[in-house]
Image (spheres, rainbow, N blue to C red):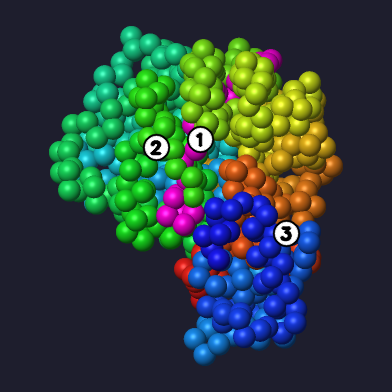
Amino acid sequence: MRKTLIYLGGFAVAVITLTVQARAQRGGTAQAPPADLVLTNGRIVTVDDARPEAEAIAISKDRIQAIGTAAEIKTMTGPNTQVIDLQGQLAIPGFIESHGHFGGVGGAQLQLNLMNVESWDKIVAMVAEAVSRAKPGQWIYGRGWHQEKWTSRPTVNVEGFPTHASLDKVSPDNPVLLVHASGHAAFANGKAMEISGIRRPTESPAGGEILRDANGDATGLMRETAQRLIKRGAGAPPPTPEESAARDRQVLELASQEALEKGITTFEDAGSDLATIDLMKKMVDEGKIGVRLWVMIRQSNETIATRLAQYKMIDYADGHLTVRAIKKSIDGALGPRGAWLLAPYSDKPESSGLETTKVAEIEETARLAMQNGFQLCVHAIGDRANRETLDIFERAFKANPAKKGLRWRVEHAQHISAQDIPRFGKLGVIPSMQGIHCTSDAPYVLERLGARRAQEGAYVWQKLMKTGAIVANGTDAPVEDLDPIPSYYASVSRKLKDGKVFFPDQRMSRMEALKSYTINGAYAAFEEENRGSLKPGKYADITVLSKDILKIPEDQIPTAKVTYTIVGGKVLYKGK
C-alpha cells in the first residue's frame, strides 16, 4: 500500500484514504490489518478540513492508517498493537520548525549559554569561572547575550555594548569569543583580537564593522562579517581529526534530541555546508537522527555550482532528509543594528544597517537555484533588505516564465515597507517568520525604527496573510529557545513581559498559529502531501500536549508541555 501511495500520485492517495476511513467507520473488516500503534481517548486536531477533529488515530508502520472515534479505531487493534490512552490530551500534527539552525542548537549546548543572563557583569563572572577550569591558551566560547535584554547597561559602553577591558581582567591569557543572540555580532576580548591580528589600523570588512570607541580603539564588538576576522581556535592545540569528528556527531545528536523533547518532528535547517549534509545523511542512515531534516545549503556559489544536482535529495530515507534549497543572507539583525533599512535607524541616524551579501552574488545564486530546481531562501530583516530580495526574486521569475509555484522564501521578513507587503502574495513568496522574535524584539523595535515604521511593517502577520501569503513559523534557534510553545503563544498574544500587546491587530488566531507551525511549514518545504496534517496516508508525525492550547485561557498556553513526540509511528520522546 505504501509504495502505491508514493509512486502513483494524488489519485492513489484519495483511494487509499477513502478505503481506510471506511473500514474505521464500519468497525473494520477481516482485510484490515491491525494497527501498530493506536492513540485513543484524546482530542485529535488534524488541521485537515475534511475531518478537523477525532478521538483516536491508528498507525501502521510509518503512516497514518485511520482516524475516527475511539470505538471505530478500537476495532483496528490487535494483540501486538501498542495503545496509548491520551486521557483527554491534545494530539496535533508534529510541530515543524520552519527556520532554525540545527548545528547551532547542538553546538550551543557545548559552550556558555548566555541567553537568559541579565547583565554583562554576570557574563564576565561566567567567563571567569570558565577560565578557572580552562587550559592555558584554550578558547572560551559562549552564545546568546543580548544587550537590550540586560537589566542595566555596562558602566563603560559604546552604543550600549561593553568594552573588552572587563573581559581582559578575568581572562588575560585565554581568548574569549561570545556570539550575540542573533548570531549577527560577536564580542571578543583583547587576547582573541591580538591572536587574530586586529589592531587600530585594521579596517572593517565589506558588510561588517569593527565597533570602535572615541579614541578609535576596537571595543571588541564585531558586527556581521567582521566576525570572520576572529581566528577561532588560533594559538591553541588543534583537535585531532578523531576529536573533531566526534564533536560534529555529538552536535547533531544533541540537536535531534532537543528537537524531539520539544515536540518537533521536522526541522527546517536554515543553512549547512556540504560536509555537514554528508554527515547528516550518514547519521540518518545509521538511525542516529530521529527528527526529520529539511536542509538549505549554505556555501559559496563557486563551491556549490557544479554540485547541486548531486546533493538534491527529496524524501530520502522515508522522509528523514530533504535537501532542495539554498540559503543566502542579504543583511544582518535589528538588535546589533545590522538590518538593512530604507532610512536610517531612529537611534543611530548615521547608519542604515549593512548589506552583508552583494545583490549581484544573490542574483547568481538565484540563477543556480532556478537552473537546478532548488528553492532560494534569503535572510532579510530590514525593509531595504526585503525590497532588494523581492526585486531579485521578481527578476528571476520574469526571466523564467515557464517555471511556476517555486515557493521561494524570505527568511524572517521582520520589517517591511507598506509598498512591499502585497508583493509577497502576488509573487507567491513565503514569509518564513518567527513568532517569538516579535515579543522578544519588541522592547527595542520602537527605538530602532520609530513608531510609524514599526506599525507599518514590523512582524505584520495579518497584513501578509491577507495578501494570500503563507506564513510559516519557527524560532530561529539557537537565537531563541527551540520550544514551539512560547513562539505559538507569542503568535496569538503578542504580549510582552510588562503586559503590553505589540500592535494587537496583527495577532494570529489560535488555529492560524497552529497551521503556521504545521501545514504551512510543510507547504513552505513542498512537503504538505506527506506531513503537516493528520490524514490517512501521511507520515505518522504527531505531537501530544498536556494542555489544549486551542481552548485553555491564553495566559495558560505557556504552561503546556510535550508529553509525546511521535515520528513515523515511533514514540521518540515521552515526557515525564
Q: Residue at x 18, y 31 (%)?
A: 235
- Asked where in the image residue 217 lies, by quadrant, the reply is top left
Residue at the outermost bottom position: 79
Q: Which mark is residue 325?
A: 1
Q: Earlier in the sequence, mark 1 or mark 2?
A: 2
Front residue of this view, candidates 393 and 167: 393
The stretch in magenta equals 316-345
- Asked where in the image residue 415 lies, by quadrant, the reply is top right
Residue 413 inside the magenta-drawn segment: no
In the displayed structure, 83 sits above or below 498; it is: below
Instruction: Indicate the secondary structure of the residue bearing disc 3.
Output: loop
Please give the count of numbered marks on the rendered protein.
3
Q: Earlier in the sequence, mark 2 or mark 3?
A: 3
Q: Earlier in the sequence, mark 1 or mark 3?
A: 3
3D distance between C-alphas at marks 1 and 2? 10 Å
Residue tagged 2 = 311
Mark 2 neighbour density, 10 Å: few (under 14) some (14–19) many (20 or more): some
Name which residue type carries label 2: Tyr
Residue at the outermost top position: 201
Name which residue type carries label 3: Val
Relative to 501, 211 lies left or right: left
Front residue of this view, candidates 11 and 289: 11
Q: Residue at x 61, y 79 (%)?
A: 32
3D distance between C-alphas at marks 2 and 3? 32 Å
In the displayed structure, 424 sits above or below 567; it is: above
Q: Which mark is residue 47?
A: 3
Instruction: Indicate the secondary structure of the residue bearing disc 2.
Output: helix
